[in-house]
Image: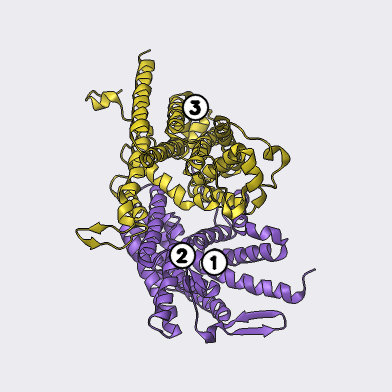
Chain colours: A purple, B yellow
Amino acid sequence: MFSLPYVLQQFINAIILGSIYALVAIGLSMVYGILRLINFAHGDILMIGAYTGLFLLTLYKAPFAIVLIVPMLVGGLIGVIVERVAYRPLRKAPEVALLITSLAVSMFIENLAIMVLSPRPRRFRIPSFLSKSHFYGAINFRNIDILIVILTVVLVVVLTLFVKKTKIGIAMRATAESINTSYLMGINVNNIIMLTFAIGSLLAGVAGMMFASKYGRIEPFMGFLPGLKAFVASVIGGIGSLPGAVMGGYLLGFAEIFFVGFLPPQLSGYRDGFVFLLLIIVLLIRPSGIFGQAEKREV
Amino acid sequence: MKRFLGVLFGISILFLVIFFIDKRFNSYYREIFSIIGINIILVTSLNISNGFTGLFSLGHAGFMAVGAYTSALLDLPLDKKAMLLPNLPYWLGHISLPFLLSVIMAGFMAAFFAVLVGYPVLRLKGHYLSVATLGFMVIVRVVINNTPNLTRGAIGINNIPNYTNIWWVYFWVVITVYALWRIINSSYGRAFLAIREDHIAASLSGVNLTKYKILSFAIGAFFAGVAGALWAHQITAITPRAFSFVTTFNIVVMLVIGGMGSISGSIVSAFLLTLLPELMRPLEEGMVLFGYQLPQLYGLTQLIMATLLILVMIFRPKGLMGDRELSLKGILGQKSS
């Protein structure tokens, strides 16, 4: 029923989408691992990254290497500011207070973007050497797609090495294990949390660039759904776990693309609904995800 | 007897106020007062699950949407229905219920969905529950977008008769607040509070967690459905985009600022925070201040709401009222019991 090239094409699409989800999910998952906070504002960092990229490309005609790096830095910076201003004062507050605050931060960023940048969607054009398509029979992909996948792999490898090998990485894992114990061990917990936000937001910023280059259209609300879906991805992989977030991102990418590509076309409109249905099913069957440890039962 | 007189007294004052607004104010102000009432219903009903039972749901806009569409489908006049929605099932295409009945049905439909969704979702805790209910809201929107025969998809249903007026709204406000008040001060309410404070202890004391959680969720959803129906017949046009995350967020802001666990707090904050956007409107549309033309500042209201919420969470996390209630005795300086 489906030809081989068609199946391969869906595979490629799934890998590209999965890469973006994986990058966004890493930040969400790392932050949740330490603070038990679902950072709703994470998706909006993605939006900021995309707009930064757009301005660099159109206003300053910057070379593409810079267009990749600057949104990362801006994203990371915004992440740190958000943590410092909104989340740090709530370190001792109940979980629900953090959740509400992150909703508010998300709304704040989105509406600031509407005020400053106008709610109108904008076209996002990438330089022609990146939008060049390769055709192999019925399969086609663009240079930017290759770049997205390679960049994701590189970033994930670097981050994994960082978390596994360096002293700071060990401190991060220790903080995720127990904030209080890490504090007693002489780890500067506040700095570690800040660093976690910086790294997560860095990845979200670059993911925003990728998202924009892939879909060619950006708007102030563009981060909301990818942010939520990345949360779904990190739950699937096991929230708090780095390989889990990556795995979950790719799994969700495949699930979503296959849902659209291999099921009757009438169903493809239900794509976003399907993702959340998946979330509810995963939470009911295996709430700790693939790599996660079962949460301790409170008795 | 004394309490009964008090309630009667309150209702008659409200009656006089509404009578005054209805006769003296123009349609713009009457609409604002209607929206205030609808928001009071939304916020107090969200308080049942989020405030009193401790289930932080983000799906209220979803239940609102269910109510709005249900009521519109039930009470559109037959000629409009034939024109707008020619592919409805026969029985649905040939009924046109009176407004009161369609609003009640809207509430029951929303409650039905709450039970349906609540059964799996309410087993989750904390954050997972919040995201899953948000997911429910997204699913509702996706389904509405994809069933054009029933809902006209993304175009939405327009030409809904403008049945809602200030009398209908406050009739439902009184019913909502009275019902919620009675529920909270009953054994059910104590079970809800017990679940919020410590669900394991509650369970050990013989509170059936699943039953009470679903009940609390469904009661909230019922009134969200009612509010959705009233809203649909006030605005007279509904699209799936109207029931978005922003809608949920605004209700949550009102709830949190009013104080989770305080019905009077919800009422006060719904009143204030509905007026805020109206006051901000000239600023958003670009007003002239001391001879300077200010730029248009769309999004300013939401920005202020978000800032308010962040500040409240940092400096007064219990909200305006915490979990206390306004009472006449308290205002008069006596210690309320």
Badge 1 and badge 3 in a common chain: no
SS for callout 2:
helix
Question: How many numbered tags mark residues here?
Answer: 3
Q: How far apart are the two marked residues, 2 and 3, measured between alpha carbons? A: 41 Å
Residue A164 is at least partly visible in this image: no
**Percent x, y for residue A203?**
46, 70
Toward which corner of the image does residue B320 lie, by quadrant?
top left
In the current view of this chain or complex, which residue is farthest to the top?
B1
**Percent x, y for residue A280?**
59, 50
SS for callout 1:
helix
Rendered residue at 52%/50% (across/down): B134
**Label 2 or label 1, whichever comes before in sequence order:** 1
* Residue linked to disc 2: A27
Q: Amino acid at mark 3?
A: Tyr
Badge 2 and badge 3 in a common chain: no
Q: Which mark is residue A21?
A: 1
* Residue linked to disc 3: B188
Q: Dot 1, how many residues are within 10 Å of its Cα: few (below 14), some (14-19), or many (20+)? A: many
